[in-house]
Image (cartoon, rainbow, N blue to C red):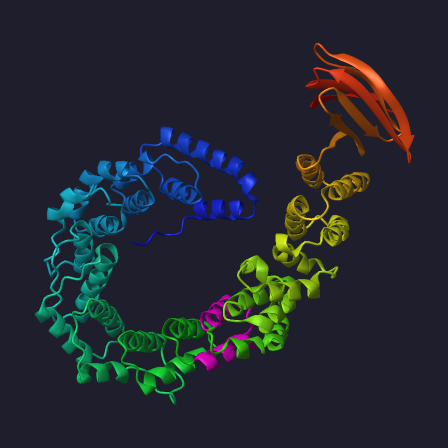
């Protein structure tokens, strides 16, 4: 089905193409008003309006689907063709059902039969909305110029119908073979008689049509997977013969496609030949990315030419998806050491291919995450030390002997390179126990991350650090470090998200401590400790002042006040202490704190 380019549609496409997405809405609304206006004043729907509606539908804008049905009923061929195109863009069966009578009528007319058949081949028929059209397709009329399209349409409506592929016309056999492949993809069924199979085998060995041979190989592959095909020597030799020899240089694309199908069939059947393996090698080493794609795909699937493929992937650059996917699929216990030794080579070729540092590190992390699955002891420690991002791809194995965990931790714990921080946090274990050192390390890490905490990766690392500060180190010192960092971050205009993360961690640490730290305002905090059931002690900086204490049915008596190292300490005797409202002033402002004791 072909549709002439409409100048009005072309103008609309050009206009929308230049606009950002959020500005297209106005243009679409304006065009819709024009289309509605013309529909009200003109007796027939405009061809350009139908095409515009199709384009709007492609852009996921709402359109009036009834316009497509009206266009299908038009007597103007190009409007009818456009209507059927619009109908095929509909997701709902509702409009398909409404169009059944129109399609039925068009099937019986030579001028409109092509459009009707095309619609049946492409419309959604999951609910069998088109089932009533079966008797009107008439796929047996050899004089029908659209006979092959009728075969496809008939198979769409009757997926369970038996198809005989025996015939004289190679193009007809091609179409029927494609129908069989489509049916198998939907139903998992390949219903051919023994006579059909023998005919196709004979045809493959005799035919000179590479297009037909490609399709027949696809059918043979399905039959072989279902154990419905006998692989005799003559047949295998005929398949091997279509593979391009090593010395041949220039071939048509279809001949290359045929050779790829033939090699795939032989490898899948476990009948590899020297010519087949040589062709795979040629694909791997090809300068054509499409050829390499199929070569690497077969290497990954059938594990042939491992060493050559690994070297080729590294030299092309592992920042290319197919190269990375292929190399990681070929890593085994027997070759992981050799691949590890090629690390510098991997980096060199990626940088040569203009991969940035972040891409290089991420790629190495993925490769090494596969290598560490086979590495042990000192080599494992070395790999994590070289590429700490491994832990972001594969969490550190807790079953590794403690001695090697400590060895790795001791090698990296003093670094100030934030690449290593996530790995350090994964290595921390309760049995390692050096709380004083952990707290000192956490403070150093926190300062580094907060100094450059606007990148997503640094924020993620900060979250992991805060989790560790809840579980390791000295809790009260960890809390003091967080409170100090909160004030510094606030002064530097840090983000609200980071400030909230720090404050939430302070409150979570309160649960583990006797004293409680409460945020008052800006960088100011107040600490309180309940002493028994009848006393409470407050600690705060000199810039804070308690204005009043209040609570329901409370008797409050001031016990003492003192200062120590610039810190004010107030104590009160309070009977029936449970909830307390504390008014605290900072400068000219007063804040009320609601405390749960």
- At x 22%, y 52%, the residue is 114
- At x 65%, y 63%, the residue is 406
User: Overall secondary structure of the magenta stretch?
Assistant: helix
Looking at the picture, how far across and down is residue 357, in whole percent?
Answer: 66, 65
Is residue 429 visible in the rendered structure shown here?
no
To which quarter of the image does residue 590 belong? Answer: top right
* Residue positioned most to the top: 553
Q: Which residues are magenta?
A: 306-330
Question: Which image quarter is the N terminus in?
Answer: bottom left
To which quarter of the image does residue 228 belong? Answer: bottom left
Q: Is residue 414 above or below residue 57?
A: below
Q: Can residue 321 be found in the magenta stretch? A: yes
Question: Which image quarter is the C terminus in?
Answer: top right
- In this image, 140 relative to 4: left or right? left
For the residue pair 141 and 265, the one nearer the viewer reads as 265
Is residue 595 visible in the rendered structure shown here?
yes
């Amino acid at each position: 089905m072909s549709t002439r380019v409409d100048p009005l549609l072309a103008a609309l496409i050009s206009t929308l193409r230049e606009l950002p997405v959020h500005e297209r809405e106005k243009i679409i609304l304006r065009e819709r008003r024009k289309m509605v206006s013309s529909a009200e004043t003109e007796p027939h729907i405009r061809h350009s309006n139908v095409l515009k509606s199709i384009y709007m539908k492609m852009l996921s804008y709402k359109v009036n689907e009834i316009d497509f049905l009206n266009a299908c009923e038009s007597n103007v061929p190009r409007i009818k063709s456009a209507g059927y195109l619009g109908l095929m863009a509909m997701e709902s069966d509702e409009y398909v059902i409404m169009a059944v009578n129109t399609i039925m009528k068009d099937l019986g007319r030579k001028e409109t039969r092509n459009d009707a058949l095309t619609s049946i081949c492409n419309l959604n028929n999951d609910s069998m909305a088109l089932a009533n059209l079966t008797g009107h397709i008439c796929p047996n009329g050899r004089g029908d110029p659209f006979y092959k399209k009728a075969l496809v349409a008939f198979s769409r409506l009757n997926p369970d119908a038996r198809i005989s592929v025996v015939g004289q016309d190679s193009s007809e056999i091609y179409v029927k073979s494609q129908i069989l492949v489509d049916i198998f993809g939907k139903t998992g069924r390949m219903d051919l008689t023994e006579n059909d199979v023998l005919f196709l085998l004979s045809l493959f060995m005799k035919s000179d049509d590479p297009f037909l041979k490609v399709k027949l190989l696809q059918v043979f592959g399905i039959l072989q997977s279902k154990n419905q095909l006998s692989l005799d020597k003559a047949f295998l030799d005929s398949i091997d013969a279509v593979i391009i020899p090593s010395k041949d240089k220039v071939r048509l694309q279809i001949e290359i496609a045929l050779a790829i199908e033939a090699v795939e069939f032989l490898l899948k059947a476990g009948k590899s030949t020297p010519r087949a393996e040589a062709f795979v090698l040629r694909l791997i080493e090809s300068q054509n990315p499409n050829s390499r794609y199929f070569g690497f795909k077969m290497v990954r699937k059938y594990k042939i030419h491992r060493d050559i493929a690994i070297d080729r992937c590294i030299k092309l650059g592992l920042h290319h998806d197919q190269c990375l996917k292929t190399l990681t699929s070929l890593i085994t216990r027997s070759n992981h050491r050799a691949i590890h030794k090629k690390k510098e080579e991997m980096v060199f070729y990626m940088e040569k291919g203009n991969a940035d540092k972040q891409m290089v590190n991420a790629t190495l992390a993925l490769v090494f995450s596969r290598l560490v699955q086979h590495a042990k002891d000192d080599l494992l420690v070395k790999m994590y030390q070289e590429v700490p991002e491994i832990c972001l791809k594969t969490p550190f194995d807790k079953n590794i002997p403690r001695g090697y965990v400590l060895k790795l931790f001791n090698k990296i714990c003093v670094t100030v390179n934030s690449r290593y921080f996530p790995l350090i946090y994964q290595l921390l274990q309760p049995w390692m126990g050096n709380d004083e050192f952990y707290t000192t390390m956490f403070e150093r890490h926190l300062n580094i991350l907060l100094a450059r905490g606007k990148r997503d990766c640094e924020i993620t690392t900060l979250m992991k650090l805060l989790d560790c500060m809840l579980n390791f180190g000295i809790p009260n010192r960890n809390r003091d470090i967080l409170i100090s960092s909160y004030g510094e971050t606030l002064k530097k205009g840090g983000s609200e998200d980071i400030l909230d993360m720090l404050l939430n961690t302070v409150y979570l640490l309160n649960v583990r401590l006797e004293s409680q730290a409460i945020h008052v305002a800006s960088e100011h905090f107040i600490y309180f400790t309940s002493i028994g059931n009848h006393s409470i002690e407050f600690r705060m900086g000199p810039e804070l002042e308690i204005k009043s204490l209040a609570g329901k049915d409370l008797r409050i008596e001031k016990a003492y006040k003192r200062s120590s190292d610039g810190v004010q300490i107030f104590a009160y005797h309070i009977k029936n202490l449970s909830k307390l409202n504390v008014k605290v002033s900072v400068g000219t402002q007063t804040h009320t704190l609601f405390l749960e004791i």
